[in-house]
Image: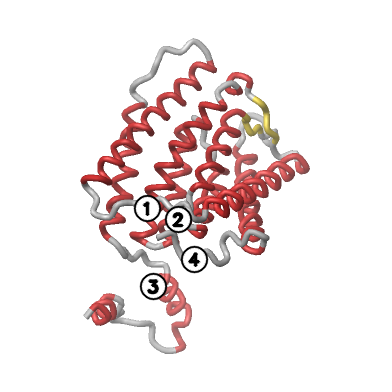
């Protein structure tokens, strides 16, 4: 019965006929291949509700600001509000998981070592290539912000809490519900938005490495590595500011070059993880469900 129902749902009443419409056939085939299919409705709903809780609390926290007397206090206020909001959201998500969700999340520990080593290796490769490219080309360089240097431990803790929500619960639910590809993309996007909320900056070039870390966690079936690596990444980029000397008065050109270099760095890191000694993403399974 299920097979017949799937066949009916995937049936196209007007398929591209003959050899005269090869291009249309390719587009139709690609659209069918990358279509979103909900495999588990409850898991998909759990992931969506969790992210809705998280960003709703973050939005509400933006209205509660403490009096600040300088740049360092403004950054500390941002971290404290984000950390408190994320912790509150995590508590609400756990309550929902215990009482509202039928399928409770599973926190696996079997592949912790592989997940941690793979995530740190991927982060190291990405950072090294990204920094070397910026220094050699003179496109950008990192500047230490002394006002935020003392806040690195707090940023690290906030990153850990954010990672618990984004990876340990939401990614697991979305990958189970809509499959690995769509689940990784959605979780990476929302995980990157947490960087924006904490850093008070539009760090678009961080999205590729977040995508790499989420994918590593899914394939190694453990999110311990991505949580740790993301926390380190958040603390590092919270303290250091990427300055682009290109086009005086604007950073648009430099940011685009930084983003392109970030995409290339993440791609190379992914290749190394696939072919490297840890085999992080080569044989660990099809998903983290």
Label 2: state its secondary structure.
Answer: helix
* Residue 247: % across, % down: 67, 35
Residue receiving disc 2: 184
Q: CA distance from mark 4 to mark 3?
A: 24 Å
**Position of 151 relative to 94 (above/below):** above
Q: Which residue is mark 4?
A: 285
| Colouring | secondary structure
**Crowding at label 1, few (<14), some or many (≥20) Cα neighbours within 10 Å?**
few
Check the image and name the residue furthest to the front: 110
Q: Which numbered mark, 2 or 3, is in the foreground of this view?
A: 2
Residue drawn at point x = 62 percent, y = 30 percent: 241
Crowdedness near tag 4: few (<14), some (14–19) or many (≥20) residues, C-alpha within 10 Å: few
Quadrant for the C terminus in the image: bottom left
Q: Which of disc 4 and disc 2 is earlier in sequence?
A: 2
Numbered disc in front, either 3 or 1: 1
Q: Which of pointers 1 and 4 indicates the residue nearer the eye?
A: 1
Q: Are the residues tagged 1 and 4 within 8 Å (C-beta)?
A: no
The location of residue 80, given as percent across then percent down, is: 43, 24
State the residue position of label 3.
Answer: 32
Q: Position of residue 150 (x, y in %)?
A: 58, 21
Residue at 60% x, 46% y is: 259
């Amino acid at each position: 019965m299920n097979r017949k129902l799937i066949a009916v749902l995937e049936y196209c009443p007007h398929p591209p006929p003959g050899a005269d419409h090869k291009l249309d056939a390719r587009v139709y085939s690609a659209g069918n291949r990358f279509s979103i299919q909900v495999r588990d409705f409850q898991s998909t709903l759990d992931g969506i509700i969790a992210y809705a809780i998280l960003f709703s609390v973050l939005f509400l926290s933006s209205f509660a600001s403490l009096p600040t007397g300088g740049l360092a206090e403004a950054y500390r206020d941002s971290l404290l509000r984000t950390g408190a909001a994320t912790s509150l959201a995590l508590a609400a998500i756990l309550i929902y998981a215990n009482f509202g969700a039928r399928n409770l999340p599973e926190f696996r520990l079997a592949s912790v070592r592989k997940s941690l080593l793979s995530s740190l290796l991927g982060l190291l490769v990405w950072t090294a290539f990204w920094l070397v490219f910026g220094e050699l080309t003179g496109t950008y360089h990192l500047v230490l912000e002394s006002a935020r240097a003392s806040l690195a431990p707090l940023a690290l803790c906030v990153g850990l809490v954010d990672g618990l929500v984004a990876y340990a619960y939401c990614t697991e639910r979305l990958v189970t519900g809509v499959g690995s590809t769509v689940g990784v993309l959605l979780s990476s996007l929302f995980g990157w938005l947490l960087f924006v909320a904490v850093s008070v900056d539009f760090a678009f070039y961080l999205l590729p490495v977040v995508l790499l870390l989420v994918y590593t966690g899914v394939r190694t079936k453990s999110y311990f590595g991505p949580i740790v690596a993301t926390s380190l990444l958040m603390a590092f980029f919270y303290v250091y500011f990427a300055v682009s000397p290109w086009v005086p008065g604007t950073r648009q050109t430099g940011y685009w070059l930084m983003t392109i270099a970030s995409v290339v760095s993440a791609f190379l890191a992914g290749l190394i993880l696939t072919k490297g000694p840890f085999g992080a993403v080569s044989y660990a399974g099809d998903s983290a469900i």
